[in-house]
Image (cartoon, grey):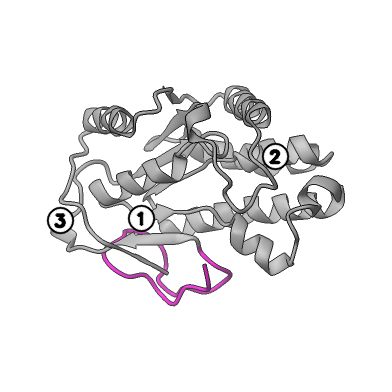
Amino acid sequence: MGEGNGRTGNGNGGNGNGSGHGRGVVWAIGDDEDRASGPETLRVYIAGAHSTGKTTLARWVSRHFELPLVTEVARSVLAEMELPLTVLRTDIDRTLQFQREVFARQSEAEDFAGKRFVSDRTFDNLAYMAHHTMGLRGILPEAEKYAERLRAPGSIVFFIRPHRDLLFEDGVRASVVWEEIVRIDGMVKVLLEMQGIDYVTIDTVNMAERARAVRGVLRTLGVTETTPKTVAAV
């Protein structure tokens, strides 16, 4: 994900100047009249541990509801900091720096996306910060401010629970271990609960059932599907 040079398509929000580091936003291409109906503010979050299929579901939501997709920024931050994966398990200070930057970039990408988007995470990376560093307390003020966005009208959080069938190496974490995924899943749940964030649990491994659950919830908000569009990264 390189630097953006302006948005493509109809995505609402964002200033369109593409300044700053990699935005981590993908815009659905389509005409304004084709945009999914619904509230002016619609922020859809897919929360959970790694290797749970969050990004796959977020991409489906982006295509079918004409929402800009806020993607993870961890890989670009990892490349910019030139950190080998082993460092994330052994160097506490550099890992803390990495996780703080990821959290800041995620928030920045959402700001750029505007009032309507789907994101494939919330403050999930704070669970990794708690697991691999000793610096979570130092970022709590920023976390509480970010939680206000998750609690605000127009935001809805879907919490994807892990399944062994979805384990795979993702190129960012040093390894995919079921026990660690379960630990991170529990930490994400604690963070959501501690911040008083309501969420919809999705615990099926079947993608069609996941999509149907999300569509059903969005329909109750007056949001309807559009014809799936292609997407362009900025």
Question: Does the magenta-highlighted stretch encompass residue 2?
Answer: yes
For the point 78% across and 40% down, the residue is 132
For badge 3, the amino acid type reads Asp
Residue 166 tag number: none
Tag in front: 2 or 3: 2
* In this view, the mark in front (2 or 1): 2
At 31% from the left edge and 45% from the top edge, which residue is drawn? Answer: 60
Which element is circle 2 on?
helix
Q: Nearer the viewer, residue 210 or 199?
A: 210
Left of 123 or right of it: where is 165? left
The answer to whether marks 3 and 1 mark residues whose Cβ atoms lie closer than 8 Å is no
Q: Position of residue 129 (x, y in %)?
A: 73, 41
x, y percent for residue 14: 41, 63
Amino acid, disc 2: Tyr
**Residue drawn at point x = 68 percent, y = 68 percent:** 80
Q: Which residue is mark 2?
A: 128
Q: Residue at x 53, y 28 (%)?
A: 164
Q: Which residue is the site of mark 3?
A: 34
Where is the C terminus found, in terms of image quarters?
bottom left
Q: Is residue 59 magenta?
A: no
Q: Position of residue 57 (x, y in %)?
A: 37, 41
Foreground residue among 213 and 199: 213
Q: Residues within 10 Å of mark 3 (few under 14, many from 20)?
A: some
For marks 3 and 1, the one nearer the N-term is: 3
- Read off the magenta span: 1-23
Q: Is residue 106 visible?
A: yes
Query: Is residue 162 something one can see in this rendering?
Result: no
Of residue 185 and residue 12, the one placed in the foreground of this image is 185
Number of labelled discs? 3
Where residue 158 sits, quadrant-wise, is top left
